[in-house]
Amino acid sequence: MISVRHLSKKFGENVVLDDVSFDIEKGDVIAIIGPSGTGKSTLLRCLDLLEHPEEGSLSFDEENYDLPKLDKKGTRSLTRRTAMVFQSFNLFERKTALQNVMEALLLVQKKDKEKAREIAVARLTEVGLADKLDYYPKHLSGGQQQRVAIARALALQPELIYMDEPTSALDPELVNEVLDTIKLIAKQGNTLLLVSHEMQFVKNVATKVIFLEGGKIIEKGTTEQIFEDPKNERTKQFLARNNIHPGPEYTI
Ligand code: ADP
Ligand code: MG
């Protein structure tokens, strides 16, 4: 079990996350939904220590990480348990797909070259890129680049994978191949915390949903609960704006 507790983050006077707490169980696919500017990216970035929250902890089973107080060793320990897939892929432009996936296996996990290559080829094959191993990012489509980034995250065997709107930088015709890849890795039992505005995808793939607004969790529950029977007026409004209309006529 992974727990987030009392996560709070300000930018100057702007309170962006206000005492956010929730649990993640192994194999959960948790979608964070909510209006733009509401703190979704900041939430993932705080958990991944790309931002520094004023308060908050993340625990993996018995191991608790007090985020504002982590030293170098704690930071390293925590970031090795997680991986992030960014909106804009963040691949190394001067490395091939294979080298991008091998990089952290060699540098962070200190795998030997042969083993790193073996893992990287396997993960790239899984995401459908076996024939693109030696391609540089600029010769890959956005969808292919994002699949390399997903393979890179998977290769590290993280206990938790963060994804921040992984399809929002893509041309519409490339969105589905990436959503299919995410669906595949969800089915494999990976634990995902993802920010998405693809409501149909969230409905189909997420096990739980968190509705965040103004830096606060307004409502959380199973996907079915949130989509079919939202309790909070703001959740209802948000879903309606996104063409999700709960009610008797609504079927999955
Ligand atoms: P979302 O991902 O839900 O659209 P963000 O987490 O990106 O929202 O942003 C939440 C709020 O925090 C916004 O008001 C945004 O302007 C502010 N914010 C985000 N990053 C920074 C930053 N580095 N410095 C100052 N303000 C920021
Ligand atoms: Mg965002």
Image (cartoon, helix red, strand yellow):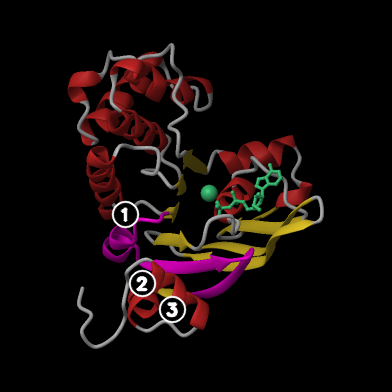
Q: Which residues are magenta?
A: 196-220
Distance between the Cα atoms at labels 3 and 1?
A: 30 Å
Mark 3 or mark 1, which has the lower sequence index? 1
Dot in front, 2 or 3: 3
Which residue in the structure is indicated by mark 2? 223
Callout 1: few (<14), some (14-19), or many (20+) C-alpha neighbours within 10 Å? few
Distance between the Cα atoms at labels 1 and 2?
A: 17 Å
Which residue in the structure is indicated by mark 1? 189
Q: Secondary structure at mark 2?
A: helix
Residue 184 % position (x, y): 24, 48
Which residue in the structure is indicated by mark 3? 236
Residue for point 28% across, 15% down: 135
Callout 2: few (<14), some (14-19), or many (20+) C-alpha neighbours within 10 Å? many
**Going by the image, does 18 lie left or right of 38?**
right
Verify whether residue 95 appears in magenta: no
Whether residue 147 is situated above or below residue 199 in the rendered picture: above
Dot in front, 1 or 2: 2
Circles 2 and 3: CB distance less than 8 Å? no
Residue for point 41% across, 36% down: 153
Q: Secondary structure at mark 1?
A: loop
Mark 2 or mark 3, which has the lower sequence index? 2
Callout 3: few (<14), some (14-19), or many (20+) C-alpha neighbours within 10 Å? some
Distance between the Cα atoms at labels 2 and 3?
A: 14 Å
Q: Which mark is residue 109?
A: none
Verify whether residue 207 appears in magenta: yes
In the picture, the quarter occupied by the C terminus is bottom left
Residue type for callout 3: Lys
Dot in front, 3 or 1: 3
